[in-house]
Image (cartoon, rainbow, N blue to C red):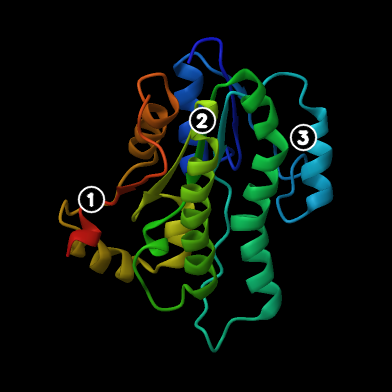
Amino acid sequence: MKGRTALVTGASRGIGHAIAERFRAGGASLLSPSRNELDLSSSESIGRYAGTIDCPVDILVNNAGINVPASGTEIEEPDLRDTLEVNLVGPILLTKAIVGGMIERRYGRILNISSIWGLVARPRRVSYSASKACLLGYTRTLAAELATHNILVNALAPGYINTEMTKKNNSPEEIEVIRKSIPLMRFGEPEEIAEAAFFLCSWKNSYITGQTIVADGGYTCL
């Protein structure tokens, strides 16, 4: 990634932080806006931030996301709208603002961080699952549209990863039950997801586009 500039959202912790560190170690120049600099729930903030970028963006990783656990009968409209704005609408608008330069230079890598909950179900993940499933459909469509411009678009769907969000949304007892349900018998580490992200966004990937790569320790095989 030497000589490339990567924009990674949600890079302050967890998977996003690991991806940013891996890209930096691989030679990329990093743009990692804070929530104050880029609020994905606000189209005005997205437009303002995009206008401040003064260098070509070669790689875009739409990683930032929120998860408000609730069932279909519990979900509150503000939480539903916030989740869809941050997890789906924001990435679409940010990509729209960035991709023109990629088209002009005939080079780009776009990676959308989805989730296994965009592919399979779990109770009380209504808004999160909906947003991540839609992100996968968006990924496939964008990949088909941008392929002729030498821009590859993929999604990465992590399973249970050892992050603050996982610990926040699951009790210690639930975490132990989940761990035993994963064929590899452990949670993934953010650095493992970062390695997959690095490959998909690097020069080593020249032919994979429109795909969802699942990294879940075999959880969805069962």
Near mark 3 (Cα within 10 A), the count class, few <14, some 14-19 or many ≥20, is some
Q: Position of residue 148 (x, y in %)?
A: 51, 30
Per the image, the residue denoted by label 3 is: 50
Per the image, the residue denoted by label 1 is: 217
Q: In this view, does 77 lie above or below 195?
A: below
- Amino acid type, label 3: Ala
In the image, what residue occupies the spot 17% across and 54% down? 185
- Amino acid type, label 1: Gly
In the image, what residue occupies the spot 65% across and 81% down? 76
In the image, what residue occupies the spot 65% across and 72% down? 79
Near mark 1 (Cα within 10 A), the count class, few <14, some 14-19 or many ≥20, is some
Q: Nearer the viewer, residue 175 or 184?
A: 184
Residue 53 lies left or right of residue 91; in this view the side is right
Q: Where is residue 182 in the image (x, y as percent from the top left)?
A: 20, 59
Which mark sits nearer the N-terminus, 2 or 1? 2
In the image, what residue occupies the spot 68% across and 34% down? 98
Residue 36 lies left or right of residue 204; in this view the side is right
Q: Nearer the viewer, residue 190 or 148?
A: 148
**Marks 3/1: CA distance?**
36 Å
**Marks 3/2: CA distance?**
24 Å
Circle 1 — which element? loop
- Amino acid type, label 2: Thr
Residue 68 placement: quadrant? bottom right
The answer, for residue 178, to whether it is visible in the render is yes
Residue 105 lies left or right of residue 187; in this view the side is right
Per the image, the residue denoted by label 2 is: 148
Q: Do the residues labelled 3 and 2 touch (CB within 8 Å)?
A: no
Near mark 2 (Cα within 10 A), the count class, few <14, some 14-19 or many ≥20, is few
